[in-house]
Amino acid sequence: MRLTRTSDLWWKNAVVYCLDVETFRDGDGDGCGDFRGLTQKIDHLERLGVTCIWLMPFYPSPDRDDGYDITDFYGVDPRLGTLGDFVEFVRTARDRGMRVIADLVVNHTSDRHPWFRDARASRDSRYRDWYVWADEPPADGPKGVVFPDKEDSLWQYDEHTGQYYLHRFYKHQPDLNVANPEVRDEIARIMGFWMELGLSGFRVDAVPFMLETSGQTDASRLPDPHDYLADLRSFLSRRNGEAILLGEVNLPYADTMPFYGGADGEELTMCFDFVGMQKMYLALARRDARPLAEALTARPTPPKDGHWATFVRNHDELTLDQLSDAERQEVFEAFGPEPGMRLYGRGLRRRLPPTLGGDLERLKMVYSLLFSLPGTPVLFYGEEIGMGEDPEAEGRQAVRTPMQWRPGRGAGFSEAEPSRFPARVVQGRYGPDHVSVAAQRRDPGSLLSWIRMLIERYRENPELAWGDFTVLDTGSESVLAHRCTYEGGTVVALHNFSADAVEVGLVLDGFDSSWSLTDLLGEGTTEIAPDGRAVIGLDGHGCRWLRPRPTGA
Ligand code: NOJ
């Protein structure tokens, strides 16, 4: 192993953990999560094996889009603490070997941001041109409302100045005008500010929307969006050579690739694998591994030091928009049979454990996939213990409930009266009396122990993160087998999507009977035949990670 290279490109075998400070842990007893509470809970993240914490927006905000509507890019929302608390947290995370990245939300601001307040005061205002205005919504402008339950247009008429402003998301989130060089400079300043305070990069919100300039009139000032993204990346790297941009680009693979840049990978460091995630749900719904195998085979390799970021669940609706209508319908029928479980006609507002009926073996199989498939795994807080959702909460808030640390009304999230919490604690079967860190910590059979073990194995076996990847033929529709090879080492992983036990045959090129396969997730050895064939048994929803070792070694 070339250790220098592996530690320089730290994101390639990172374990990213996404959390919202507001719902993680209340440190001052006022009912709202805060940086002090998060810092108190750093041991949990360290024990789990997290290497990078992704903070959802913590900036001052009227909170009409859970903090994705910002009124000050240079501060901490007072409910969550102070800049001092933020720096203490980043410093503590560093001490425990964890880097911190945060959401960079610069496609838009809140309509209460002082820039927008000024911009809408008059057509001549200092900040007018920081936003996108038009006398009429332009015919060649951007298309597609993101929140169809709340908005029916991307343009909102401003009575006072008699023009429309662009808002890709809610109308209270006016889009910033990146065609304006002053806005571009300000975005760089924001990044520079937070890197100076210790951030190792950003999860960049809504990248294609942020770069979109269609429909704008002053063509001479419009930058090439990809040149602009490359500029941002080089600014980032000049300030901090190890910093990354992890981009939200939910597009088909072919349209996502340009966001990595060219052969030098000069734009985003990582993009989320939205396609692979959605095909995994289709595979689970069908109990047939092929949709996922096909996606992984079709998935291009990012250029140079780029990497995919893989995930099972994020903080939004579980979008299924990259599936065909018929495929989406199949997933809806399997995992969201009731209309209230769905959102925007394209996604689910559920977490994974309830969708799988709480089947622990199946859940364990899914997380084994997450940590063995190529790409950097990203966990959403609470996944490690199998938290459920609150169906009573509004829209996407269903999956953004307080972290469940221990049994009891407040779930160990806060000692305050639960009516003061930012969101209701999950009730019933997935509530804290049944699902909590405290209950699972010392239980070797728990999901938490399983995920901790997977993370340990993933970090110990560099082939998984760094290796070349191939899907192997198993002759079984329900089993996905893949092989990762790196610097002479090989790891093979198998996952059974069906509830029935199965035995599959694999041919492992380059191996013969002088080798046998050692289980990495449990005990056991499997022989390899002289022609490289191995016969491997899997339980229903079983999974195995195997390493060929010279027999007798
Ligand atoms: C994507 C974020 O993930 C989502 O939560 C947010 O509502 C929109 N961007 C707007 O910022």
Image: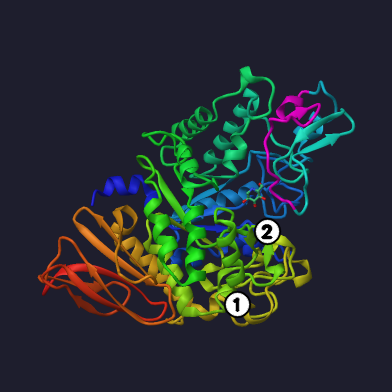
| Residue lying at 56% horizontally and 56% vertically, measured from the top left | 324
Q: Which residue is mark 2?
A: 345
**For the residues marked 2 and 1, what is the alpha-carbon distance in whole angstroms?**
35 Å
Asked if one can make out residue 14 in the rendered structure from this viewpoint, the answer is no
Corner quadrant of residue 499? bottom left
462 left or right of 42? left
From what the image shows, is residue 148 above or below residue 179?
A: below
117 left or right of 36? right
Instruction: Identify the magenta region.
Output: 126-148
Q: Which residue is mark 1?
A: 406
| Residue lying at 30% horizontally and 69% vertically, measured from the top left | 474
- Report the amino acid beneath label 1: Arg
How many C-alpha atoms fall within 10 Å of the one at disc 1: few (<14), some, or many (≥20)? Answer: many
From what the image shows, is residue 18 above or below residue 251?
A: below
| Residue lying at 29% horizontally and 54% vertically, measured from the top left | 467
In what quadrant of the picture does the C terminus appear? bottom left
Q: Is residue 381 magenta?
A: no
- Report the amino acid beneath label 2: Gly
User: Residue 246, position in %: x, y?
Assistant: 50, 46
